[in-house]
Image (cartoon, rainbow, N blue to C red):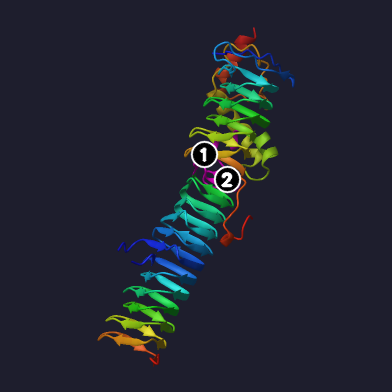
């Protein structure tokens, strides 16, 4: 299942996910993969295993149901979470928490959605104005 | 007419507190607290400057205040909420906007991720969740045990994850054994 | 019809200002100002001054009632307070204590 073997040891080394041969730009960290260290890359990334460390990718980030990610910050374009995440999410696109997601951390993105059933604790900071009758912006 | 429902119509403003045992629909403006044991709907035209509590709370309009519910809170598209949201189940549809803290669970933050990551949790969100003492030991093994043994990965073996020394607990045996086997 | 309904089992402590019809089945303490009709159904309890258009009262009001139109106290109504309206009818079986002011 491990499509990508990242050679991160128990250190904070910089790991660039290799492009998986299968799906174009998408890298997949399989269910049996555990990584401790920083992950960064340009393409999409799917995490199905366990990661301890920051994740910064330009493409979309997908965190599978059985995955577990602990980091200070997760940065990506669109972020879809079905698994467990501890850490802040900073997306340049949408953030979506599926019904099985368990997330603790603040979410930033152009659009945040949370499916019923998801466990979540954190802040959302959407940018919008309240109607004047509620005293405007804040 | 529905004798059990309450509607604050679009041309109505209420300043004060609303309490009650029935469903309430807000199409107008409310300033003050709202506490209902039924379902609370804040429609698209509704504007509420108040803390709102219901069995279920469904929001399509604008709210400045905290939302809580016995069962669930749904923010639909168009909802705009400035305030904290807390209910056993929370759903936010795409297009539902929030500025504030959102928390699912019964109130003491005893849901899964919280308990199992005391160390980090404590750093990330101080004071909001399970006391560290409690969270540290017992929660961890259970989760580790439940996790798939680290099969082929020769990567992380050295118990990369173990911030907590592996406690000797039956549940853990499986994982531990797998790890040991692999080490050789 | 009425767009605001204060259902039975609901209590509002404060001010209700409506530019539309209001039906009250529950309890209001404070103030009720409506532009149009106000219906206070049997079982409703209003401890507040009430003003509005045409009013039909079958419930309880403690407070002054002001209408730009008519006030109808139906059988079973219980009103303690002054009523100011263009017209007023008090049905047999309605309880009323207060002054009536009908000068237009």
State the residue position of label 1: A114
Residue A90, x across and y down, in percent: 65, 35
Residue A47 seen = yes
In the foreground, B10 or B107: B10
Host chain of mark 1: A
Q: Secondary structure at mark 2?
A: strand
Give the side of residue A87 with respect to residue A116, left or right: right
Give the side of residue A54 with respect to residue B32, left or right: right
Quadrant that contains the C terminus of chain A: bottom right
Q: Is residue B92 magenta?
A: yes
User: For the magenta stretch, what is the residue range?
Assistant: B90-116
Q: Secondary structure at mark 1?
A: strand
In the foreground, A133 or A97: A133
Q: Residues within 10 Å of mark 2 (few under 14, many from 20)?
A: many
Q: Is A49 above or below relative to B11?
A: above
Host chain of mark 2: B
State the residue position of label 2: B102
Q: Nearer the viewer, mark 2 or mark 1?
A: 1
Residue B117 seen = no
Give the residue drawn at x 62%, y 58%: A136
Residue B137 falls in image quadrant: top right
Residue B44, x across and y down, in percent: 47, 53
Distance Cα–Cα, label 2 vs label 1: 10 Å
Number of numbered discs on residues: 2
Give the residue drawn at x 68%, y 13%: A7
Residue B181, x across and y down, in percent: 60, 10
Q: Is residue B144 magenta?
A: no
Q: Pointer 2 and pointer 1: residues touching (CB < 8 Å)?
A: yes
Q: Residues within 10 Å of mark 1 (few under 14, many from 20)?
A: many
């Amino acid at each position: 299942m491990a499509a990508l073997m990242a050679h991160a040891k128990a250190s904070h080394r910089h790991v660039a996910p290799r492009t998986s041969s299968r799906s174009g730009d998408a890298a997949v960290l399989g269910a049996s993969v555990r990584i401790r260290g920083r992950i960064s890359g340009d393409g999409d990334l799917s995490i199905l295993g366990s990661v301890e460390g920051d994740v910064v990718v330009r493409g979309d980030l997908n965190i599978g149901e059985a995955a577990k990610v602990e980091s200070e910050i997760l940065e990506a374009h669109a972020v879809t979470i079905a698994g467990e995440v501890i850490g802040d999410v900073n997306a340049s696109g949408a953030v979506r928490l599926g019904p099985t997601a368990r997330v603790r951390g603040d979410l930033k993105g152009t659009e945040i959605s949370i499916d019923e059933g998801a466990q979540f604790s954190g802040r959302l900071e959407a940018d919008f104005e309240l109607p004047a009758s509620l005293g405007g912006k804040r | 007419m529905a004798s059990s429902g309450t509607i604050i119509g679009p041309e109505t403003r209420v300043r004060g507190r609303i309490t009650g045992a029935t469903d309430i629909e807000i199409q107008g403006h409310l300033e003050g607290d709202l506490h209902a044991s039924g379902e609370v709907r804040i429609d698209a035209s509704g504007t509420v400057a108040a803390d709102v509590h219901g069995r279920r709370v469904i929001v399509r309009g604008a709210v400045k205040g905290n939302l809580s519910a016995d069962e669930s809170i749904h923010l639909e598209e168009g909802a705009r909420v400035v305030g904290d949201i807390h209910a056993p189940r929370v759903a936010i549809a795409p297009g539902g906007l929030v500025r504030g803290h959102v928390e699912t669970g019964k109130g003491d933050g005893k849901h899964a991720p919280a308990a199992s990551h005391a160390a980090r949790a404590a750093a990330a969100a101080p004071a909001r969740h399970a006391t560290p003492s409690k969270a540290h030991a017992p929660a961890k093994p259970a989760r580790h045990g439940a996790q798939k043994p680290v099969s082929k990965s020769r990567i992380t073996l050295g118990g990369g994850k173990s911030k907590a020394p592996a406690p000797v607990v039956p549940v853990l045996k499986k994982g531990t054994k797998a790890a040991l086997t692999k080490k050789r | 019809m009425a767009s605001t309904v204060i259902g039975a089992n609901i209590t509002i402590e404060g001010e209700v200002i409506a530019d539309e019809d209001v039906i009250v089945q529950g309890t209001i303490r404070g103030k009720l100002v409506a532009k149009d009709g106000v219906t206070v159904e049997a079982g409703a309890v209003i401890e507040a001054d009430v003003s509005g258009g045409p009013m039909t009262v079958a419930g309880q009001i403690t407070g002054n009632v002001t209408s730009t139109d008519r006030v109808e106290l139906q059988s079973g109504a219980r009103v303690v307070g002054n009523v100011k309206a263009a017209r007023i009818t008090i049905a047999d079986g309605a309880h009323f204590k207060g002054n009536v002011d009908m000068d237009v």
